[in-house]
Structure formats: C-alpha cells, structure tokens
C-alpha cells in the first residue's frame, strides 16, 4: 500500500483549513438567501456533448482541459468543467417556459486539466449564480452588485471590477467582418493558435493569453466602435447605475468572451492579492445560450467565483475556530452516563460542548479543558452523581477562584440562569 497519493492538481482539505471554508460558505449562503436566490444541484458527470455545445469546441476548456472518458456503456462522459451549461440543460430538460424568471445558485467541484499552481487546480470549486429570463440592465446591475456584496461581506480588500460590453449578435457580425480582414493582414504576427482560429472562431483570438498576440491586438479594430446605438445606450445605462450605487469599476475593452452566445455585459473581479491568477470572479450575459442549446429564447446573465482563490484572499478572522463553550469533565460509571445525557441537553442551547470520553484522571481532563481554552467547565464525579447534580464554573484565570455553582441535573431553570448570567447563551 505504498505510494498511494492524491492526483496532481487535487487537494485534501483538512479540518483546520475547513474552518475558513465553512465560514466563507456560510456568509455566501446567507447573502444568497437574503437576495432570494435559490439553489440548483446538477450532476457532476454529464454527456461530453453538453460542454461541446454549451461552452464551444474552440475554447481552451473544451479543446484542452476536459476530463473526458468512456463509461462501461461506451458513452462519452465528462466531469463538469463549469456550471452554466449544466444549469441551462437542467432548465430546458425540466420544461423551462419562454417567460421564466429564475435566480439560481450552485456551488461545487469543477474539473479542468490545467497546469496546477497557486490558485489553479485540476479539481477546484466554484460558486455560480445565474439569473435566467432577466433582460433588463437592472438585472446586470443587480448581479454585479451581488458579487460585489458577497466579496465585501468576506472582507476582501484590493478588489477591482472591470466591465465591458460585447454588443448583440449583429454588432458582433459587423465587427467580425472588419476584424477578419485585419487578422488576415496581420496573420504572421499572431501566435499559431490564433492563426488557426481566424477562420474557425476569430472572436476567441481576443481572449488570447499570448503576450505577443495581445500586443499586436492593441491596434486591431475595436468591437466597441461597432456597437449599435441601442447597445451603446444599454452600456451607458449600466455604467450610470453602477456609479449611482457607488460601485467602482474600470472599463476594459479587452475583456471578452469569444463565443457566439455571449452578449452585452462582461465583467471580472480581480484582486491585487492573488498574484498572477488574479481573477476571482468572472461573469457575463449569455442571451443566446439557452436557445442555442435547444430551449426557448431566454435571456440570462451569470457569474462564477473561484472558491480556492476566494479563500486565499478572504480575511484571516474567518479561519478562527469557534471556541468550546463547555468542557465536561467526568469519571465513574454513573457519572459518565449522566455526563453524556447532560452534553446532549446543553447542545440544544446551541452551545459547543465537548464531552471528555477518556476516563482519565480529573487533573488530566482539567489540562485538556485548559488547552482547548474552553469558556467553562462542568465536573461530574461519583459524589456529584450520587447527589444527581454537577458543578459548573467559568474557566478563565480571574474566575478560577470563584465559587463554583452546584446545579441539580433536574433544575433546568437554574442551569439556564447560570448560562445566561455568564454570557454563554447568545
Ligand atoms: P483563468 O483565466 O484564471 O483560467 P477562466 O476564464 O478559465 O479563468 P472561468 O471559466 O471564468 O475562469 O471561471 C470563473 C472563476 O473560476 C475564475 O475567475 C477563477 O476564480 C476560477 N477558476 C477557473 N479555473 C480554475 C482553476 N483551474 N483552479 C482554480 N480556480 C479556477
Ligand atoms: Mg482558464
């Protein structure tokens, strides 16, 4: 059994690390629920074709990064690399109507075969939000604001919001014509991947990470100059409303998502604290996706936050574990049963209760309570058990000499008073 290791790019999250994860998830879920967004859970495993059609064959995700395999029934299956395509499929399959309005979120593992590094894994986690059936600029504003507020509630500093618009299909077609002409002329200055895309999916070239290509593209025609008046107005409205809400943003005309079904608003949140993998949240409008996947014409906008990157930049205070409220020191046959019973009663008050199961000497159990920095201790030994009672007292140094309280196991009122007086109940 030597050498059994996790796969490259996957990680074990251990209990100490998960304190922060759980606190972050709790804050996120609270904010989602206050915004009346509902959860959806789709399978992690899907037909490969879903992602080919829903993300696009020409994307890096589909062409290079998917975990695809044949199952025993010879069906091509893929571990989901993102969530939007699955949500769209689930809605279509479950009978979405053309005037549906749904605000949905999902959270869970995604899989991409990439080069692992800080903030980049092969199994990672995303929180995604999708507003389905929403067309107005105000829905763009609401979803950007939601991402902003979630990141704010997590105490994230050094946050930058970048926005852009991609116009509608016609704007894009007009742009594409002159863009292709320009690409043909400048073909030799582009990287090979981009050259190959000129005829297949030229817009994807705008997404290129190649630094030489990026530099050359600075002189290319700009999609922005091809926007219709209507698209232009939509974008101006978006900016006005964000300004009104005092959400700071910068415009980045190179922020694109090079697929046909992306329209209008695109946005990204980056953080200076993340190093080179700086994008923590990416989102945009995809008015044509659901129709293209075989559903009714349905406008939509969404975003996805990478949880690993989010955890890296959220506040340290979220990694602090909850303190033990009461440590129950107990020894003796009857005492141990009474202590077990008492621990269950105390947990009903939403107290964090640790019952010592060791049977060790009292002094050893005291030491453990001390090490845990438990706020208070309860002692039940043979004497207490014989009288059907227990003693309780605060555990900090100042109160150490304080008289302890003896409480009968049946006297819940006295117990509650003690807990209240000593601020153990919230
Ligand atoms: P990147 O440019 O960093 O590869 P992307 O454009 O592929 O990002 P999206 O598909 O928009 O990312 O996913 C949304 C978010 O999910 C990203 O902003 C990032 O925070 C996170 N993410 C994407 N891929 C990974 C990964 N391999 N490991 C960890 N987080 C990731
Ligand atoms: Mg990527």
Image (cartoon, rainbow, N blue to C red):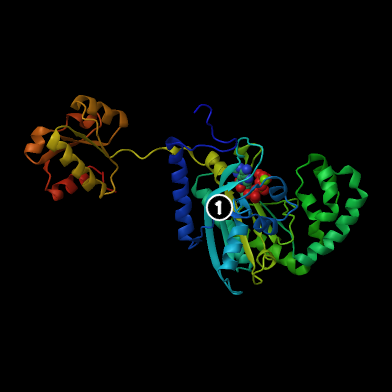
Instruction: Please give the count of numbered marks on the rendered protein.
Output: 1
Residue 107 higher or lower than 35, as above or below: above
User: In the displayed structure, would residue 324 be above or below residue 136?
Assistant: above
Q: Residues within 10 Å of mark 1 (few under 14, many from 20)?
A: some
The one nearer the camera, 386 or 19, is: 386
Residue under pointer 1: 44
The residue positioned farthest toward the right in the image shown: 185
- Label 1 CB-ligand 1 distance < 8 A: no
Q: State the residue lying farthest toward the front.
A: 73
User: Where residue 321 sits: x, y (%)?
Assistant: 39, 38
**Closer-to-camera residue (317/36):** 36
Q: Relative to 352, is 223 on the left or the right?
A: right
Name which quarter of the figure residue 341 lies in.
top left
- Residue sitting at x 19%, y 25%: 361
Instruction: Work out whether residue 274 or residue 43 is closer to the camera in this orientation and state it.
Output: 43
* Residue at figure coordinates x 68%, y 45% from the top left: 65
Q: Residue at x 43, y 40 (%)?
A: 19
Quarter where residue 172 is shown: bottom right
- In the rendered structure, the answer to whether residue 359 lies left or right of residue 137 reads left
The reply to whether residue 322 is visible in this rendering is: yes
The image shows residue 115 at horizontal and vertical percentages of: 66, 37
Secondary structure under the numbered disc 1 in the rendered image: loop
Question: Where does the image place residue 393, in percent across and percent down from the top left?
Answer: 19, 36
Residue 218 in sight from this viewpoint: no
Left or right: where 197 falls relative to 160: right
Residue 123 rendering spot, x and y as whole percentages: 58, 43
- From the viewer's perspective, tell me whether residue 205 is left or right of residue 32: right
């Amino acid at each position: 059994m030597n050498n059994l290791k996790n796969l490259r790019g996957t990680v074990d999250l251990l209990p100490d690390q998960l304190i922060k994860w759980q606190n972050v998830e709790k804050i996120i879920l609270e904010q989602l629920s206050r915004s009346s967004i509902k959860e959806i859970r789709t399978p992690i495993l899907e037909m490969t074709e879903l992602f080919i059609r829903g993300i696009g064959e020409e994307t890096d995700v589909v062409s290079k990064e998917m975990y695809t395999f044949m199952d025993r029934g010879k069906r091509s299956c893929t571990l989901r690399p993102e969530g939007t395509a699955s949500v769209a499929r689930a809605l279509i399959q479950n009978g979405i109507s053309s005037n549906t309005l749904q605000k949905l979120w999902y959270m869970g593992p995604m899989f991409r075969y990439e080069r692992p590094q800080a903030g980049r894994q092969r199994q990672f986690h995303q929180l995604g939000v999708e507003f389905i059936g929403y067309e107005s600029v105000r829905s763009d504003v609401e979803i950007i604001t939601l991402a902003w507020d979630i990141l704010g509630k997590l105490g994230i500093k050094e946050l930058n919001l970048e926005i852009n618009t991609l116009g509608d299909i016609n704007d894009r077609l007009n742009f594409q014509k002159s863009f292709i002409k320009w690409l043909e002329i400048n073909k030799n200055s582009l990287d090979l991947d981009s050259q190959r895309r000129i005829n297949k999916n030229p817009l994807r070239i705008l997404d290129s990470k190649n630094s030489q290509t990026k530099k050359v593209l600075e002189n290319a025609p700009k999609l922005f100059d091809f926007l219709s008046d209507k698209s232009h107005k939509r974008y101006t409205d978006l900016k006005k409303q964000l300004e009104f809400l005092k959400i700071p943003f910068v415009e980045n005309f190179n922020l694109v998502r090079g697929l046909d079904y992306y329209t209008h608003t695109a946005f990204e949140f980056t953080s200076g604290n993340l190093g080179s993998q700086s994008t923590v949240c990416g989102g945009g409008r995809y008015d044509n996706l659901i129709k293209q996947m075989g559903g009714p014409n349905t406008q939509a906008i969404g975003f996805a936050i990478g949880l690993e990157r989010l955890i890296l930049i959220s506040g340290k205070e979220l990694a602090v574990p909850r303190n033990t409220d009461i440590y129950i020191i107990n020894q003796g046959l009857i005492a141990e049963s009474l202590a077990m019973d008492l621990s269950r009663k105390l947990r009903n008050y939403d107290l964090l209760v640790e019952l010592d199961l060791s049977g060790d000497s009292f002094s050893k159990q005291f030491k453990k309570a001390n090490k845990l920095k438990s706020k208070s201790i309860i002692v039940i030994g043979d004497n207490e058990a014989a009288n059907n009672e227990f003693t309780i007292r605060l555990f900090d140094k100042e109160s150490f000499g304080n008289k302890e309280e003896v409480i009968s196991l049946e006297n819940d009122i006295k117990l509650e008073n003690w807990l209240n007086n000593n601020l153990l109940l919230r």
